[in-house]
């Protein structure tokens, strides 16, 4: 039943509300995964191994050396498991954008729970004649079933439990993951330093612009535009200075600036740059600085090119921003 | 509007029932702060709802200041500065204008009414004007009602603004009025 006892440090990898991309990114370290399995006893990794929650519950507190949690806190079940892993782990790592800042699922914080359920269950294109809605408790002949409750607001891992380290990225780059794992192993061996608690691992301490090869000059823009074809943009000049809403100025480096190199604006998946208290605030300042106009009407005309400001400025970081969501979402939270 | 409308002294009943908004007012060292100072010297009354914070320039206003004000319970934010063309730092007030137009759109998408963020220009001579504008904004926000952003929004984010500002090289000095007092003031 229970695995053979080993003296290897224990590793748990858990995905909460996530797309699975973080698990793929870990597997993308290729054959190095065998070295990970050689060094660590992988006690939980639902995507890859068959460790059971009951095995974790049976462990002593702090028995797991490192837990990597990806995904955000969407249901009370994920919150429960995050708390369980926190208790059982010496080091808890917020792995990837969802765990550290909410990511795409965090955009749900723009809407109330009711609005979200309406969209899913009650649109014209939804076949749902009985108006079925999810329930958190269901009576069946054998008794009452408790099901994971969809919480009114999505939360990040550090809004639920104490987090020791953060690895940003959607998903984190695999070479960065491997470097972090090697550093952790070295620290456990005593052959390398343990990063200070609270550190951001597997990323730089500057911005994507810093890694971007494109040339910047003082050019000012008259309007923001969307990409329709690569041909209409200069391959060497800064995308923002060509009017493309590029999130590079507010985004932490570490990805290698691959998107702007390929002609696509940075979308900000590595989270706020060092020192940026609020990703959107930093980006709004940057965008405002490249606009040429100085009359309100002309400024508005330039800004009309940003059709969805909340989505542009908080695509990945809404749940971890200063306001954390819209007023409608907070209202549901209050009624909860 | 030339003279600031002065609200009648509230009765005890008013004090219990009338919603009194909290307005955070960011002023610039060279124009709008002096306008508010002039209003005080000239005994021009304006509502005590406003809490003025002096920056060196409206261009120093990081949109994060406004977001933090809302997250910590402000009902409205006034951004004030020198008139266009009169900025002590040439054109930084125009940067403030661009940020303000953009910030207002973003806040609207988050369900915060545009009247809750207002931009007002006031020269150092316009004490009566800034007092009237503070009264106008306060009245508009009183009519809108409280914003009531949950108190745990700011506390629980995991964001430490103080350390974030330290990381940018301690630029928080311009935030604190006590520090700003020590800034060189040419005409004193």
Image (tube, rainbow, N blue to C red):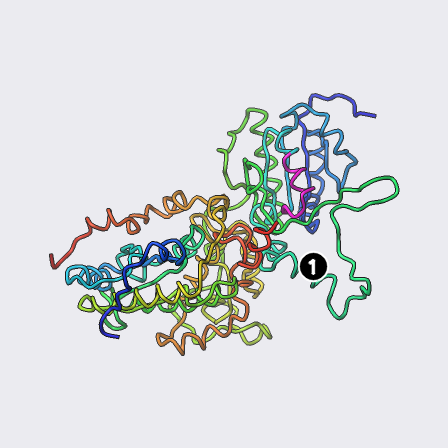
- The local secondary structure at tag 1 comes to helix
**Would residue A279 be counted in the magenta stretch?**
no
- The residue that disc 1 covers is A117
From the viewer's perspective, tell me whether residue A109 is left or right of residue B6.
right
Crowd rating for badge 1 (residues with CA inside 10 Å; few <14, some 14–19, many 20+) = some
Give the overall secondary structure of the magenta segment. helix
| Residue at horizontal 83 percent and vertical 25 percent from the top | A1
Image quarter hosting the C terminus of chain B: bottom left
Q: Is residue B166 visible?
A: yes
**Would residue A75 be counted in the magenta stretch?**
yes
Question: In the figure, residue A143 lies in which quadrant?
Answer: top right
* Front one among A67 and A189: A67
From the viewer's perspective, tell me whether residue A84 is left or right of residue A146.
left
Relative vertical location of residue A59 with respect to residue A292 in this rendering, above or below: above
Question: In the figure, residue B50 lies in which quadrant?
Answer: bottom left
Relative vertical location of residue B136 with respect to residue A12 in this rendering, above or below: below
| Residue at horizontal 67 percent and vertical 48 percent from the top | A17
* Front one among A76 and A302: A76
Q: Which residues are magenta?
A: A72-83
């Amino acid at each position: 039943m229970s695995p053979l006892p080993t003296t290897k440090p224990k590793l748990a990898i858990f995905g909460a509300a996530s797309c699975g991309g973080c698990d793929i990114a870990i597997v993308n370290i290729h054959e190095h995964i065998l070295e990970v399995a050689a060094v660590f006893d992988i006690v939980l990794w639902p995507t890859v191994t068959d460790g059971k929650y009951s095995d974790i519950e049976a462990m002593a507190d702090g028995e797991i050396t490192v837990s990597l949690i990806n995904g955000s806190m969407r249901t009370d079940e994920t919150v429960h498991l995050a708390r369980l892993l926190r208790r059982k782990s010496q080091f808890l790592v917020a792995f990837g954008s969802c765990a550290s800042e909410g990511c795409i699922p965090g955009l749900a914080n723009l809407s109330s729970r009711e609005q979200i359920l309406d969209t899913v269950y009650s649109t014209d294109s939804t076949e749902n004649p009985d108006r079925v809605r999810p329930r958190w408790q269901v009576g069946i002949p054998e008794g009452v079933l408790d099901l994971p409750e969809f919480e009114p607001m999505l939360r990040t891992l550090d809004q639920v439990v104490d987090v020791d380290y953060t690895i940003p990225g959607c998903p984190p780059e695999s070479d960065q993951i491997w470097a972090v794992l090697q550093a952790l192993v070295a620290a456990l061996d005593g052959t390398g330093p343990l990063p200070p608690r609270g550190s951001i691992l597997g990323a730089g301490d500057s911005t994507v612009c810093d890694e971007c090869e494109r040339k910047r000059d003082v050019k000012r823009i008259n309007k923001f535009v969307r990409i329709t074809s690569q041909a209409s943009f200069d391959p060497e000049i800064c995308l923002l200075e060509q009017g493309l809403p590029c999130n590079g100025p507010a985004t932490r480096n570490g990805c290698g600036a691959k998107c702007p190199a390929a002609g696509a604006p940075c979308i900000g998946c590595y989270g706020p740059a060092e020192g940026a208290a609020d990703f959107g605030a930093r980006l709004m300042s940057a965008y405002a600085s490249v606009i040429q106009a100085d009359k309100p009407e002309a400024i508005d005309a330039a800004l009309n090119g940003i059709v969805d400001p909340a989505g542009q400025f908080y695509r990945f970081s809404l749940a971890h921003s200063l306001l954390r969501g819209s007023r409608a979402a907070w209202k549901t939270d209050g009624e909860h | 509007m030339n003279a600031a409308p002065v609200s009648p002294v509230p009765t005890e009943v008013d004090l219990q029932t009338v919603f009194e908004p909290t307005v955070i007012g960011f002023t610039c060292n060279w124009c709008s702060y002096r306008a508010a100072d002039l209003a005080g010297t000239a005994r021009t009354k304006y509502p005590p709802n406003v809490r003025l914070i002096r920056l060196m320039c409206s261009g120093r206003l990081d949109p994060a200041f406004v977001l933090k004000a809302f997250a910590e319970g402000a009902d409205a934010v006034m951004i004030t500065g020198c008139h266009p063309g009169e900025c002590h730092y040439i054109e930084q007030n125009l940067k403030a204008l661009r940020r303000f137009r953009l910030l207002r759109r973003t806040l609207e998408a988050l369900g915060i009414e545009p009247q809750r963020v207002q931009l007002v220009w006031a020269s150092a001579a316009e004490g009566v004007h800034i007092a009237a504008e503070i009264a106008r904004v306060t009245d508009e926000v009183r009519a809108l009602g409280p914003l009531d952003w949950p108190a745990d929004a700011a506390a629980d984010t995991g964001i430490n603004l103080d350390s974030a500002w330290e990381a940018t090289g301690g630029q928080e000095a311009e935030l604190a009025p006590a520090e700003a007092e020590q800034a060189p003031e040419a005409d004193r």
